[in-house]
Image (cartoon, helix red, strand yellow):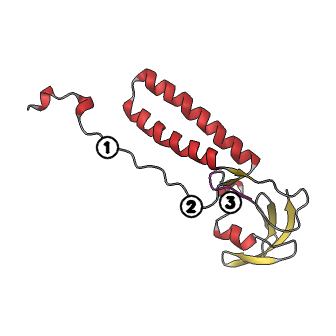
Amino acid sequence: MSRAFVKESDQDTETLPERAISANANLVTARGLALLEERVRELEAERSAARAADDAAALARIARDLRYFQARRDSARPVSAAAHPEQVRFGVRAVLRLPGGAERAFQLVGEDEADPKAGLISYVSPLAKALMGKGVGEQLPFGALTAEIIALQS
């Protein structure tokens, strides 16, 4: 059969791989849960627009992302930080002092909420694991340096 008689929609289309879902518990802060819910709403709106535009490629991408974010929202386990934390735990913000006096703050959050540039690190990251369970005054490796925890905030 000549290719001239084959509709574009009949041709094999490249399928998008599913987004990997972490095997770790899906712990979330209240903010993290709100972000997941917001992303699902955004994707539903994008899906409506893509349907209206008859954009098959966008629909495939949106459907894949929607499956991921709905699964993450549905499996979310909200965790609240203690009001006055004495140890680094999920949701707690730790302020570190580096040699030379520079300070950096990191909050332990869920995997989908992580944004290292904003100081939000996944609770399964190496730095979070080094921080977990430590209190004010304790030291930990920070790259090639050693940092001291100087404050904990909820």
Q: Nearer the viewer, mark 3 or mark 1?
A: 1
Q: Earlier in the sequence, mark 1 or mark 2?
A: 1
Residue 9, image quadrant: top left
19 up-or-down from 153: above or below: above
Q: Are marks 2 and 3 in contact (CB under 8 Å)?
A: no
Is disc 3 placed on a helix, strand or loop?
A: strand
Is residue 109 located in the magenta-colored stretch of the structure?
yes
Three-letter amino acid code at the position of disc 1: Glu
Three-letter amino acid code at the position of disc 2: Ala
Three-letter amino acid code at the position of disc 3: Ile
Say whether residue 17 is left or right of residue 38: left
Q: Which residues are magenta?
A: 107-112
Q: CA distance from mark 3 to mark 1?
A: 34 Å
Q: Residue at x 67, y 55 (%)?
A: 110
* Residue situated furthest top in the rendering: 52
Q: Which mark is residue 23?
A: 2
Query: Is disc 2 surrounded by few (<14), some (14 to 19) or many (20+) residues within 10 Å?
Result: few
* Residue situated furthest left in the rendering: 1
The residue where tag 3 is placed is 121
Residue 90, image quadrant: bottom right
Q: Earlier in the sequence, mark 2 or mark 3?
A: 2
Q: Which mark is residue 102?
A: none
Pick the front one: 144 or 100: 144
The residue where tag 1 is placed is 14
Q: Residue at x 80, y 64 (%)?
A: 94
Q: Nearer the viewer, mark 2 or mark 3?
A: 2
Is residue 115 located in the magenta-colored stretch of the structure?
no
